[in-house]
């Protein structure tokens, strides 16, 4: 693998000379790709990153990582080589690359095959790359390395870094009806298909205090997480709770409120009380009618005897 070339300033931009020798012809590009890629990765370790940005991608969706030609000079695509790669990773494969007249898919990292697209504006100097079908493993920093051929050989031109933060929206928390346990009530709250892993919080709405609870989580098949939390509180009639989940990456806060006064449990208790009261009333009326009937019957019998 070629050594690290020395850097020398040129027109305000840091440039690096490649090893001396006859420039590679286009027909040699594919055969030399692994060696060149190794050189480019090492070279980046000694370059100062420019235009570092951060983007958020949703699992299963797509995201564009930007890399642009910003010079005033006319842009000629065939004078440029572009390579997207993982930052600070020594590898002979890359995310995607453009070399004039060459198909570089053979050297693409397997996990990125059929998941990348260069911008339709590539011919106008837009080196941006779209990553498709985002996965949790894509959460990392990437680099766009650009070389330009001005003197018959390709030299470092510019590079930019893009940090991809992978995320997924959690579902609205669901609180199950409380289960009595002695003098306490057991509440369970669930939220699913979110990323990265977050915690559920129980809030006592009376004083906005955070309540202690038992929590567990499980990884779903798509790499997202499902979270459950169990809370035990004293069985009082003024129970008023929030179950909350926050996804800081998406600036997302979702809250579900449980108010025992408006809950099904509260309505059911009123129904039971109403039914019991109705039964007692029916029994009372029946007893009254029976007593009157029995009294009248006795009166008739005494008259007949006399």
Image (tube, helix red, strand yellow):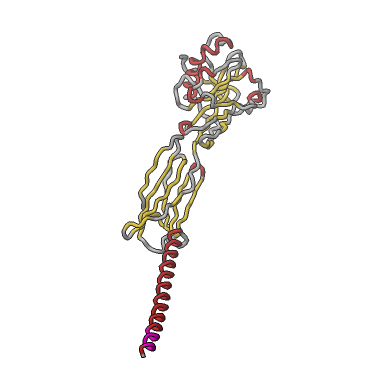
* Residue 219 image point, x, y percent: 41, 38
Badge count: 0
- Whether 221 is drawn above or below 12: the answer is below
- Between residue 280 and residue 194, name the one nearer to us: 280
Farthest top residue?
22
Farthest bottom residue?
306
Q: In this view, does 74 lie to the left or right of 46?
A: right
Q: Is residue 67 visible?
A: yes
- Between residue 270 and residue 192, name the one nearer to us: 270
Q: Give the range drawn in magenta.
A: 298-304
* Residue 140 image point, x, y percent: 47, 32
* Residue 193 image point, x, y percent: 47, 41
x 51%, y 25%: residue: 112
- Whether 215 is drawn above or below 72: the answer is below
x 46%, y 16%: residue: 3
Indicate whether residue 302 is drawn in magenta.
Answer: yes
Indicate whether residue 86 is drawn in magenta.
Answer: no
Q: Can residue 9 be seen in this view?
A: no
Q: Is residue 213 left or right of residue 94?
A: left
Q: In this view, does 24 lie to the left or right of 229?
A: right
- Between residue 225 and residue 212, name the one nearer to us: 225
Farthest front residue?
305
* Residue 4 image point, x, y percent: 47, 18
Farthest right residue?
74
Answer with the quarter of the image where residue 103 lies: top right
Q: What secondary structure do most residues of the magenta stretch adopt?
A: helix
x 40%, y 51%: residue: 188
């Amino acid at each position: 693998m070629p050594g690290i070339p020395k850097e020398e300033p040129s027109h305000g931009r840091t440039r690096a000379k490649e090893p001396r020798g006859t420039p590679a012809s286009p027909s040699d590009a594919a055969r030399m790709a692994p060696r060149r890629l190794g050189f480019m990765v090492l070279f980046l370790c000694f370059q100062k990153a420019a235009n570092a940005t951060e983007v958020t991608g949703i699992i299963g969706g797509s995201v564009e990582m930007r890399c642009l030609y910003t010079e005033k000079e006319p842009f000629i695509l065939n004078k440029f080589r572009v390579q997207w790669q993982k930052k600070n990773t020594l590898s002979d494969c890359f995310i995607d690359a453009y070399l004039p007249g060459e198909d570089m898919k053979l050297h693409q990292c397997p996990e990125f095959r059929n998941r990348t697209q260069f911008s339709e504006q590539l011919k106008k100097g837009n080196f941006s790359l779209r990553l498709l079908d985002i996965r949790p493993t894509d959460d990392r920093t990437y680099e766009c390395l650009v070389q330009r051929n001005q003197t018959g050989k390709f030299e470092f031109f510019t590079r930019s870094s893009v940090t991809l933060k992978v995320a997924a929206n959690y579902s609205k928390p669901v609180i199950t009806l409380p289960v009595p346990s002695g003098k306490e009530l057991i509440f369970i709250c669930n939220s699913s298909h979110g990323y990265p892993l977050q915690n559920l919080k129980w809030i006592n709405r009376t004083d906005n205090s955070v309540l202690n609870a038992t929590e567990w989580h499980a990884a779903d098949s798509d790499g997202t997480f499902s979270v459950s939390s169990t809370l035990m509180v004293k069985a009082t009639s003024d129970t008023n709770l929030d179950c909350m989940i926050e996804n800081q990456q998406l600036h997302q806060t979702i809250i579900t409120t449980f108010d025992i006064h408006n809950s099904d449990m509260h309505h059911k208790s009123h129904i039971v009380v109403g039914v019991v009261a109705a039964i007692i009333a029916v029994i009372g009326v029946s007893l009254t009618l029976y007593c009157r009937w029995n009294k009248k019957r006795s009166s008739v019998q005494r008259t007949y005897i006399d």
